[in-house]
Amino acid sequence: MSQAPIPYPFAEPTRLDIDPRYEAIREQGIVRIQLPYGEPSWLITRAADAKIAYDFRKFGRREGLTHAIPGLHNTEGIKIPSLLLNMDPPEHTRIRQLAAGAFTPARIQEMEGWVQGFTDELLDEFEAHGPGADFIAMFAHKLPVLVLAGILGIPKDKAFEFKKWIDISSDSSATPERKLEARDTTLDFIRGLIAERRENATDDLLSVLINARDEGDKLEEEELVSLAMALWHGGFKTTLWQLGTTVFTLMTHPDQWHDIKEHPDNMHAALGELWRWIPSFKPGRAFGFWAKEDVTFSSGQVVKQGEHVLIEFAVANRDNSVWPDADKLDFHREKPQAHFSFTGGAHSCVGQHMARLQIRLAVESLIRRFPNLELAIPADEVEFDPDSFMRGIRKLPLKW
């Protein structure tokens, strides 16, 4: 008789901790778990197993439309086949390639001056406020909105109104009815923007996607709407919370803050290590995949076709077999390996280069303008958001 699934998650995290129980689970390989909603799942905590599960030839998302999706909340009422998140190749590849063209490293490099302008403008306001200014409210909440609004061609005066409904739709404390209302309002907003672009085309990603729909016949209408919504959802909250936890981690690791100031040529490696080390998602929040065939994992355990796996990539990022002394934040690792913080495989974050750019410019600008930056309150008084799906910080007052 197979062992009963373990209730999961074990507990809500406090701040940026990794539950010590994961270490024993990693030694076992993969284990069967039961989240509050949906069918059982397999928990993945090893880096080697994460690579297996991110192989779209063996695992996919489309299968989930016919299953009771494992999760913290009941999501049965919002299964949408046209969402990029619920697609598998080749449909997923076709649509993703249209969006990916706007986020190539070369295109992102062209946008650097534009994003730096937003960064400087927000830090001017931050500095004018004086010591005690809240980095989250005055910077992290605003920069991703301004950048995404520019990419999608959303008018600046409407961008923060649009953000309000996105906030509600991703708020775990909101009722299902409130979330549904927020989603419908967001979709109506996007449809309105699409109608405006058809009347007056502009030089932004939304117009490019509309052209692919109307002239290139590469998108269905609902695919167009869902892709625009996915780009906003995927690029706003994730960047917001990563901006906050990146700065918080540097402020609470003064040796690393000094190191990154003294070795600006090591910025790429330092930020990569920060993203590996920081556990961005809370347990049970990362989306999972369904096996397309029977798959054997590193421990010899077989996941049967149609079974679900949940990849806790924040835990996989602390696998000592890949990153020696993985719990240590080390900006000078020899031959650092690729991490999973932007997930992996076909569903890796399409806008990750834009997120990396925003965070890099923020850190470089903080170093240049506020070399003596530090927390304005004790670290243990910094409040994390209990309702966020990520390790989000509510307020981060700083002084210099």
Image: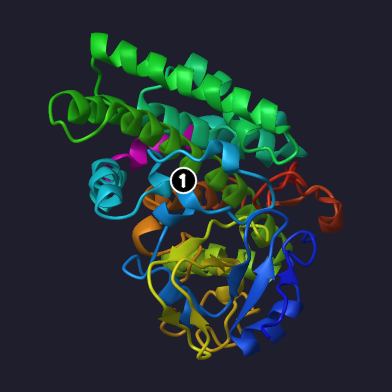
Residue range of the region highlighted in magenta in the rendering: 109-120
* Residue at 54%, 63% in the rendered image: 275
Asked if 71 appears above or below 108 in the picture, the reply is below
User: In this figure, which residue is indicated by the disc labeled 1?
Assistant: 358
- Rendered location of residue 248, percent (x, y): 69, 55
**Residue occupying the far left of the picture:** 215
Percent position (x, y) of residue 331? 53, 74
Query: Residue drawn at (47%, 17%), measured in percent from left and top?
Result: 188
Q: Is residue 191 at all visible to an observer of this figure?
A: yes
The number of callouts visible is: 1
Residue 12 higher or lower than 24, as above or below: above
**Residue drawn at the location 29% of the way across and 41% of the way down:** 99
Q: Residues within 10 Å of mark 1 (few under 14, many from 20)?
A: many
- Residue nearest the viewer, comparing 266 with 68: 68
Q: What element carries label 1?
A: helix
Quadrant of the rendered image containing residue 216: top left
- Which of the 4 image quadrants contains residue 20? bottom right
Along the horizontal axis of the image, is 299 left or right of 34? Answer: left
Residue closer to the observer: 193 or 62? 62
- Residue at 32% across, 39% down: 111
Residue 296: percent from left, percent from top:
44, 84
Looking at this view, name the residue that lies furthest to the front. 1
Question: Chief secondary structure of the magenta span?
Answer: helix
Visual colour scheme: rainbow
| Rendered location of residue 38, percent (x, y) | 64, 55
Q: Does the magenta stretch include residue 74?
A: no
* 279 up-or-down from 335: above or below: above
Q: Is residue 120 visible?
A: no
The reply, left or right, for residue 31 in relation to residue 238 is right
Q: In this view, does 80 lie above or below 371?
A: above
Q: Which amino acid type is marked by label 1? A: Gln
